[in-house]
Image (cartoon, rainbow, N blue to C red):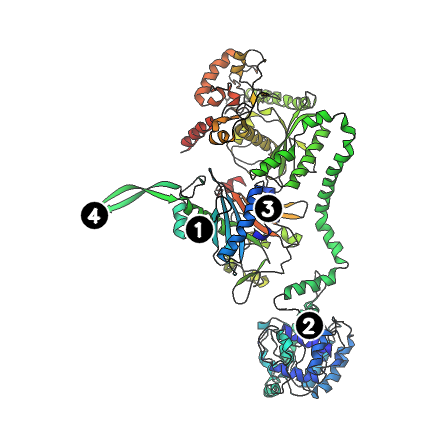
Amino acid sequence: MPSSFRNFFLLTHFMEDSTTLKQEKENQELVEAGQPWEEMVTASSQDPESGLSEPPEVEQGPEAGPQTRSSPPGIPQSGASTPVDDLTGPGASTPPSPPQEPSTSLSPLALARQDFMAPWQSNKTTSVISEAGTPPSDHLEQPSDKGESTSHQTCQSEGNTFQLSQQTKCHLYGPRDVSYNNSKEKELRFAISQEKDSNSNYDLDQPESGASEMAPNMLEIAIQNAKAYLLKASSKSGLNLYDHLSEMLTKVLDTRPENPVDIIENISQDVKMAHFSKKLDTLQNENEMLPTYEIAEKQKALFLQGNLEGADQELEDEITEHALPNVMESAFYFEQAGVGLGTDETYRIFLALKQLTDTHPIQKCRFWGKILGLEMNYIVAEVEFREGEDEEEVEEEDVPEERDNGDSEADEADEDELPRSFYKAPQAIPKEESRTGANKYVYFVCNEPGRPWVKLPAVTPAQIVIARKIKKFFTGRLDTPIVSYPPFPGNESNYLRAQIARISAGTHVSPLGFYHFGEEEGEEEEEIEGGRDSFEENPDFEGIQVTDLVESLSNWVHHVQHILPQGRCNWFNPIQKSEEEEEEEEEEDEEKEDEKGEEPDYAEQEVGPPLLTPISEDLEILALMLMAAD
Amino acid sequence: MDAESLLLSLELASGSGQGLSPDRRASLLTSLTLVKRDYRFDRVLFWGRILGLVADYYIAQGLSEDQLAPRKTLYSLNCMEWSLLPPATEEMATQTSVVKGRFMGDPSHEYEHTEVQKVNEGEKVFEEEVVVQIKEETRLVSVIDQIDKAVAIVPRGALFKTPFGSINVNRTFEGLSLSEAKKLSSYFHFKEPVELKNKTLLEKADMDPSLDFMDSLEHDIPKGSWSIQMERGNALVVLRSLLWPGLTFYHTPRTKNYGYIYVGTGEKNIDLPFML
């Protein structure tokens, strides 16, 4: 009986129509009759034969425990027959489950049920036969779909036959007119339908029974369809809705939570998870969590490498201390300003930088920043190599390339057999030497701390010039081609390098006086012409008042060389084909440069040379540029 | 982001580089609870921060029970004292569309915009230059409104619609699964739907009326204006809007944590089609 009750209301649960639950009263009667309800609901836990006993029993049915799908497949069928007979007896009005069954004659329904049951593989279905004989409408289906509401009304035949005919679409939560003698159940709408024990329901049902018998076939078919649909196993999980709903309702009735209607989704999920905790989880989750584990492994390596190598590096401690900045400390200061990546991410970056310094002969290393990309981001480290061999390798690769370019230009001009073009491509401006100008630092990038660092190639003036004209997003992959107009010579790694160079040149500032020029470096006059490009920390720097720093921009100076429109920091005269800079011609060119607006390099400052120009000068240039744009 | 899970949310959203300093965080925690009490909000969201030249605006929004009802927006300059902003109107939007450039940071700052208007005097038509003054507060309101309408998002399933029409927070939202989290269609715009009616019948058949009642991100124009990234392996999904750079949405799959925050200059990225 408990099962039957459960089945009953499970069915009703699905019924969404607000069909009167008077039919339910029939259920009650049926319950009392102890008739097993033949139900679509597969959640038959108890033997269907338990039937519907008194409503109290019925209530307790579901409480008997989690649905135990014990009823063998055969039972429904066999049970179908017996309950049919029993149904006639008691008038258990509230069929626990099957939502609405149009009242049909008991036997036809029972038979129909049996037939219906046969093909169903679900063994849980407890057969509750609606004596009404009206095939249960698709109680399990969406409410509005079946228009069988009317039929169920007629279902209930008072007395024995349990009318599964609750309206086909009894909405579980829908309003039910059925008087529910069990106050508790009232909260569960569906329960309401079932618990009717009033005989009054019978009266309602009876007149309808006649009508419902009119179209039993259609109803049967519809019910079969509905039930078949509900029993369809999900391709993902192997569950079917029928079973799931019956389980859910069983669980609700067992646990009797407060306001179950509000948390029914949670209950549903819990029920599902109870199924799947066994095998499918491991299979499914493995693929999904793999990247997480990978990156966690890599980062674990990061953490460990610090520990392992710490002992060996005692000798080199001095060097490493200088090389690696105190990333955490600077992160702390940045955080005060509201800029930062979060403490653990910063720590991982610190470890990654440490790894970088360990693997390369680096003199100075600094965390430059993070560039966001579409698919992945870049973490950029600014590195200065020791006076060593690593840079030369890069140079060797690049120098032959440049020579080839120069030769090819000449060749093309000569080999033209068609009208000779007098056009000679302007000589490519050579990139600056390493360690000077825009290539003063070498930059390494990685996508995430823990991944290997990749060295970015040196930047050429042409790349800088074009990078100024285009605006593109980074994707996160260094080999992505940059499609733009004007066409960018290079792929994403070059574009990234160019942008880094521009950002450094434009925005790296320091307080006035922090750096100063070494005073022992050769003749000052010559150096001014070439532009000073080196500076040292000023040991006598005493700091400037914070208020001064905030109020006036002239207290901040650039310490990175400005990049000329040409794309270099140091002027290169393309008219001359030699790559050497001659001072005399430079002077003439310098004047021209002044007119072009490259004043910041040559503006005179109290501080001195153009390298340490206060950023107040920037505003003038910015204003000029804006006005030009307008 | 919900004010109640502020610290965790800020940690999760910190990948974009812009966050809050510790003193701001602490003051937010206290002041937002007070705001919630004073204005009787059901939920208070810390919306984000608009960077100005002189000062930054910190923006918070308060929601009532119905999640899609018009939200009340408050701003503060110091994260302690909050002032209510007027609701946005169409007129404001057109008025402020002519103002470009950064925010100043002073709410009483007025932008001057000269318009050429034709004034009819009798039979003659004069062209007069009228200087229209637009207050920064108005601009702030309309920018916040635009950002909300364009890029404020929630994951599918986080809100559900009751049959009575009101929209509630789904307490049983367990988070998106990993495969769902990578798809744009699992995220909805947090506003009244505009395109739902245009869906084909096939699509409508699969929709769940209680969950799919807002526009998804799939059909946003231009295509590709969202960048989806997984951080920490697959443990955190971050969506960044490319149309309004600075809008970061984060969600930890299989958990209830999600939220969005805007930290930016308040300028739309109209170069987006060229940058993709």
For marks 1 and 4, the one nearer the N-term is 1
**SS assignment at label 1:** loop
Q: Quadrant location of residue A210?
A: bottom right
SS at mark 2 in the image: helix
Q: Residues within 10 Å of mark 4 (few under 14, many from 20)?
A: few
Which quadrant would residue A404 be assigned to in this image? top right
Q: Mark 3 and mark 2 in contact (Cβ < 8 Å)?
A: no
- Both marks 2 and 3 on one chain: no
Q: Residue A21 in the image: x percent, y percent?
A: 60, 80
What residue lies at 70% left-to-right and 75% top-to-bottom?
A6
* Earlier-in-chain disc, 3 versus 4: 3
Q: How crowded is the residue under tag 3: few (<14 C-alpha within 10 Å), some, or many (20+)?
A: many
Disc 1 or 3, which lies upstream in sequence? 3
The dot on residue A253 is: 2
Residue B79 pos. (x, y %): 51, 46
What is the CA distance from the residue labelled 1 to the residue labelled 4?
Answer: 41 Å
Chain letter for mark 1, please: B
Q: Which residue is mark 3?
A: B10
Task: Report the side of A297 relative to B77 (left or right).
Answer: right
Q: Which residue is mark 4?
A: B122
Q: How many marks?
A: 4
Q: Which residue is labeled 1 in the image?
A: B85
Label 2 vs label 3, nearer the camera: 3
Cα separation, mark 4 vs mark 2, equals 83 Å
Tell which subunit mark 4 falls on: B
**How many angstroms separate mark 1 from mark 2 (CA)?**
49 Å
What chain letter is assigned to the residue under label 3? B
- Which sits in the foreground, B183 or A610? A610
Give the CA distance from mark 1 to mark 3.
Answer: 24 Å
Three-letter amino acid code at the position of disc 4: Gly
The residue positioned farthest toward the left in the image shown: B122
